[in-house]
Amino acid sequence: MEKTSQLTNQLEHTLGDAASATPDRIRRAPKVLLHDHLDGGLRPETIIELAQAVGYDNLPETDPKRLAAWFRDAADAPAKEGGAGLVRYLETFTHTCAVMQTRDALYRVAAECAEDLAADGVVYAEIRYAPEQHLEAGLTLEEVVEAVNEGFREGERRALAAGHRIRVGALLTAMRHAARSQEIAELANRYRDLGVVGFDIAGAEAGFPPTRHLDAFEYLKRENNHFTIHAGEAFGLPSIWQAIQWCGADRLGHGVRLIDDIHVSQDGSVKLGRLASYVRDKRIPLEMCPTSNLQTGAADSYHEHPIGLLRRLHFRVTVNTDNRLMSGTTLSQEFGYLVDAFGYTLDDLLWFTVNAMKSAFIPFDERLAMINDVIKPGYAELKAEWLFRPATGQPGVASGSAAERD
Ligand SMILES: [Zn+2]
């Protein structure tokens, strides 16, 4: 009896090791990214070089390390300083967009984006950007989309040459405060199956409800196209409700405020409101971005981030980066923060990753193939590594001494 329980303990310990999510394993695990902004993920060196090339001399720093720190600090400002901090946060995108106005710059930024994600173990990504923000030097909307698409293809090729496989799709974003959403929706439809996989709407939530852009959403639905809406980050439940029930969003960007519709009693029992229930019942994907949410003040700490509860309640939660430059992060780091906060294992990471792949905007058969042929085998391989660990001479299931004992 005692021997059996000893063996069980040993087995649990070993299986625990097999599934433990160390930083190295997180990086090597196949990952899927659904919410990442092209103008929020540039390499600091690239910003400096592009600024020199186009004669843009408003950068706050010209040393890559100091520039990276400036971006991170400016993005921290909203949580630290409130409304005044938001101005500083928005300034970050003024600089990145300023250097992304030519075909060559867009091509380079898109190629490096794909390369960087692939090096971080991302196997599938949907990267979003607003074409209307890249017209200052005379490019047309179509030229912007084509430059970014070609950049992504080049990045995929470079990644493959470096031993990483990645597939990148584009989401075209319309700005909430502007009036071009119908035009951008039509653009997304025209480039469908040509590198663009869907549509998004972003920008300040307060004062600019998604219903302002109903024509664009209704058009996309008539065209059987896909879209996601930034909602429920700074603004509460009405924004989420409108995005889903009025606009018909396929996914929610952030959606952290959904937590306001979930009541947790002192005894730990949980009651979902009608909207939260609907989101869970309909398996509506939530594109959560932990570090970004901390920076904008949508959550106070990783430990208190709603993702912990939402994962426990089996919402269709996905983990994302939002703006890698401004948050000084990678998808692996975001997973690392969650592993530290909630004790997640590789099994949890696999769950988040399969959730994300199921929620992607590419066709069902291709999503399924990514899950069965890339993601699941990748995690299985990581978990199997303990079988081939070199013997340490210490007691343990895989060591010679344990094998002799058995
Ligand atoms: Zn975003």
Image (cartoon, helix red, strand yellow):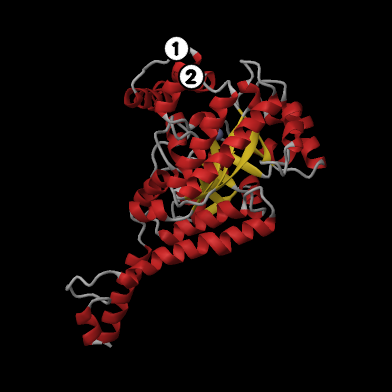
Q: Secondary structure at mark 1?
A: loop
* Kind of residue at badge 2: His
Q: Residue at point 25% right, 70% down? A: 390
Return the residue nearer the eye: 159 or 293.
Answer: 159
Q: CA distance from mark 1 to mark 2?
A: 8 Å
- Give the crowd class for mark 1: few <14, some 14-19, many >=20 residues within 10 Å: few
Return the residue nearer the eye: 2 or 192.
Answer: 192
Quadrant in which ligand 1 is drawn: top right
Q: Is residue 47 found left or right of 137 in the rendered image?
A: left
In percent of width and height, residue 258 lies at 57, 42
Q: Residue at point 32% right, 65% down? A: 17
Whether residue 238 is visible here, answered yes or no, is: no
- Give the crowd class for mark 2: few <14, some 14-19, many >=20 residues within 10 Å: some
In the depicted structure, whether residue 22 falls above or below residue 186 = below
Which mark identifies residue 307? none
Q: Secondary structure at mark 2?
A: helix
Q: Are marks 1 and 2 in contact (CB under 8 Å)?
A: yes
Q: Residue at point 40% right, 56% down? A: 344
In the depicted structure, whether residue 371 falls above or below residue 214 = below
In percent of width and height, residue 401 lies at 19, 81
**Quarter of image, res 329:** top left
Ligand 1 within 8 A of label 1's CB? no
Q: Which residue is mark 1?
A: 58
Q: Which residue is mark 2?
A: 95
In the depicted structure, whether residue 153 falls above or below residue 215 = below
**Nearer the N terminus, badge 1 or badge 2?**
1
In percent of width and height, residue 260 lies at 55, 40
Q: Is residue 209 found left or right of 257 in the rendered image?
A: right
* Kind of residue at badge 1: Asn
